[in-house]
Amino acid sequence: MEIASKYNPSEVEEKWYRYWLENRYFHSEPDNREPYTIVIPPPNVTGILHMGHMLNNTIQDILIRRARMQGKNACWVPGTDHASIATEAKVVAKLASQGIKKTDLSREEFLKHAWEWTFEHGGIILEQLKKLGASCDWDRTCFTMDEIRSKSVIRAFCHLYEKGKIYRGVRMVNWDPQALTALSDEEVIYKEQEGKLYYLRYKIEGEDKYAVVATTRPETIMGDTAMCIHPDDPKNAHLKGKKVIVPLINRVIPVIEDEYVDMEFGTGCLKVTPAHDVNDYMLGEKHHLPAIDIFNPDGTLNEHGAMYAGMDRFAARKKIVEDLQAAGLLEKNQPYTNKVGFSERTNVPIEPKLSMQWFLEMKDLAKPALEAVENDVVKFYPPKYKNVYRHWMENIKDWCISRQLWWGHQIPAYYLPKGGFVVAESKEEAYQKALKMVDYPLSIDDLRQDEDVLDTWFSSWLWPISVFDGILHPDNEDINYYYPTNDLVTGPDIIFFWVARMIMAGYEFRNEKCFENVYFTGIVRDKAGRKMSKQLGNSPDPIELINTYGADGVRMGMLLTTPAGNDLLFDESLCEQGRNFNNKIWNAFRLVKGWKVMDNIPQPATASIAIRWFDNILSKAIVELDDLFSKYRLSEALMVVYRLFWEEFSSWYLEIIKPAYRQPIDQKTYDATLAFFDALLRLLHPFMPFITEELWQALYERKQGDSIMIAYLPESQPFDEVLLTDFEKVKEIISGIRTIRLQKNIPNKEKLPLQYTGDYEGTYDSVIIKMGNLSSIEKVQEKEPGAVGFLVGTTEFSIPLFDKTDVEAELKKLKAELEYQNGFLQSVMKKLTNERFVQNAKPEIVENERKKKADAESKIALLKENIAALEKTISEK
């Protein structure tokens, strides 16, 4: 295969992705190999790729490709989520742009529009993932509202209802006035808001005095059904047993007593609005207070809002404050910061609202799921998230699973004409159940299905089971082979929404864990640390990045600074670094393949040494990689391969074995080099799939259907640590020579003699002579005057530069360096003689300062020696 002079990512990526699909390398079927399974966190069906998806799916692809190359039967199941609230909002907005209101349509008509929207926009994100190189088994693509998943959700609901785990009742819920639906507690984000605390006067019945209440929400006074004081509060004791009059509407309400009231907040008087505050609701239940709901579902005031009926809640607040002021019933207001709940989906302030909803009891479900994580049956990476998980699971509340939407899985509850309901998987089954319950004539058409749908997460909590049809057919071949899955890669922001609930579902429906490991990625942020979002306009278009830098470059850029669980400060220059690395690999390949090979010339000693050294360092790197992958430290794993290729292979190995200009290379060395290149490409493949496939195919003659994807990863062999340590010293010597050439402006082509004092074994002289372009290496009793030297361990190496050095200028330079080193040593000593620093600093920091001290002392000794030698030379002239 001919290799172009420049790497063209778009051409290479399209070609090889098509090749992989045609050869069905991504597809998996159960067999006798060890399975390795990942299920994709299903993105919203109508969504598009963002930077979080890029990071998450790059990591998944690395894990799945590596498992495939380890000989495992790798299966990565893709799919999308129907996203009830988000998708319905988009469909409603589209209809509104056409002048159609949702309320003008029947449910069936609306769902027709929703499916059209889904077919039009659904799957865009999966197509975009292909651009990234995602090696999903596309034949297994699932959708949370396809037939199998939909039936699975309904069966799960019926199963839990039959067990008594699902119930229906009026409870205080979080209400989204824009989406017009209830939300679970996890879908509410609390934000600090600058508001006001209003002090309202409630006239005491039968007296000319007032009780004053402090509130942030004066618009809710129409829902007040009591005033509450602390029984031990002396300043409000005169209110005991009395009644007060609600301002503006003149409703008389009782004063009740409860220890719940904070005597120090405001005036110590609390207005109780059971329909619009969760704590007031509990007080109302305890003291048998009526609950008056004053809001319409859209956040406007209803008929209980009296003269403010029809006004938006925030407009009503402004008007009520004005009217209270005019009536002399507003004592004062003051700035006040409090936390306000916002809908995670629509970003509008939620309303606590009494509502008839469906709930799932969570306490019993949570127990085995908590134990699994506590005992590392399900392992978290990084483990710090165990604490977050434990806190939530130990304080878990029942899950409000109903949503007032049409797009989603309609709740399988069927209401009877004279009251009551039945729960069944189909209307026909419900009818048969109903017939056994009633003593009056009943037709199937008399049954009315619940209008609500299930929370989207109620389908995705079944995902690891339902993608293998394990709810409907719990003993099928796929579920028995692929389940439990191996790794889940997700963001910590959905640890409660999804991760915890999947673990619960695993134990409820299969009585075992659903996955072994959870790798929590960080959040992708911009350079300023802000979370990337469309609203801030700080998120690049991932497809544009791929077009600019190539998929491999972007994948590498995403991974370069993303340790597990820590946020990634994304900088486009990281993708550029990735692209540069691609070019480095490409150029190294072209260099090697451009050499002329002869099989009748002997192998140089330098090449023999280089091959032995690189073979050992390759084995050591493979051990490091295996260890880092076992700890999910993927960023560090990438850096190991990056340094191995860029520094050890390209900068050292290839330079050592490179033949002289226009000279051939021996066959033995060339074959070893191609074998190393093959191993490096295989190690790199999970991270950078496209360029590695292109070069692997060009490395040797390959058969049709061959692919690096299914080639085995190289395995480590025992390596010689002594050889590697010795060779590091060789590299230090060569670097020292190059530094002198640079400092003294000596051309690389000019041969130099190298001298040394002390102990030194000449095992690797041939490499040092070639790489340093030396005329000789010889031992001397003492360094010659005017020679420039450097230390490697305890051995001093030097290059005599009698006619090349301005002795006076060199002496001046050395004295300046000595002055600097003395000053540096003093600054280090200040720290080390400071007892507080030594006692309080981390041990590794103190150790680092001690190392600095030793290094400075060593340099000072050498500088003094060199200065003395130069001064002697000057005096002898």
Image (cartoon, grey):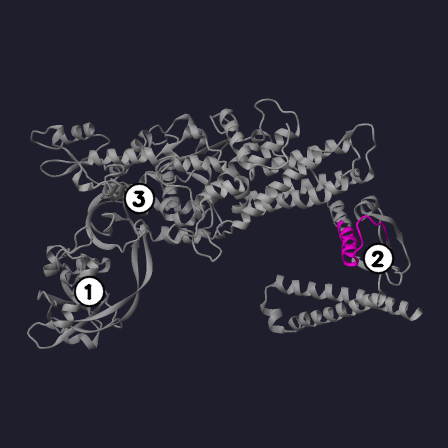
Observer-nearest of 787 and 436:
787
Which residue is the site of mark 2? 798
Which residue is the site of mark 3? 86
Q: Crowding near pointer 3: few (<14 within 10 Å), some, many (20+)?
A: some
* In the image: residue 450, left or right of residue 133: left
The residues bearing labels 1 and 2 have C-alpha atoms spaced at a distance of 84 Å
Residue at the spot 33% in from the left edge and 34% down from the top edge: 120
Q: Crowding near pointer 1: few (<14 within 10 Å), some, many (20+)?
A: few
Residue 523: give x, y in percent of width and height: 45, 51
The answer to the question of whether label 1 and label 2 lie on touching residues, with beta carbons closer than 8 A, is no
| Amino acid type, callout 1 | Lys
The answer to whether residue 567 is seen in the rendering is yes
Task: Say which element carries label 3.
Answer: helix
Residue 311: give x, y in percent of width and height: 16, 57
* In the image: residue 86, left or right of residue 36: left
Please give the range of residues in magenta.
731-753
* In the image: residue 803, left or right of residue 845: right
Which residue is the site of mark 1? 318
Task: Say which element carries label 1.
Answer: helix
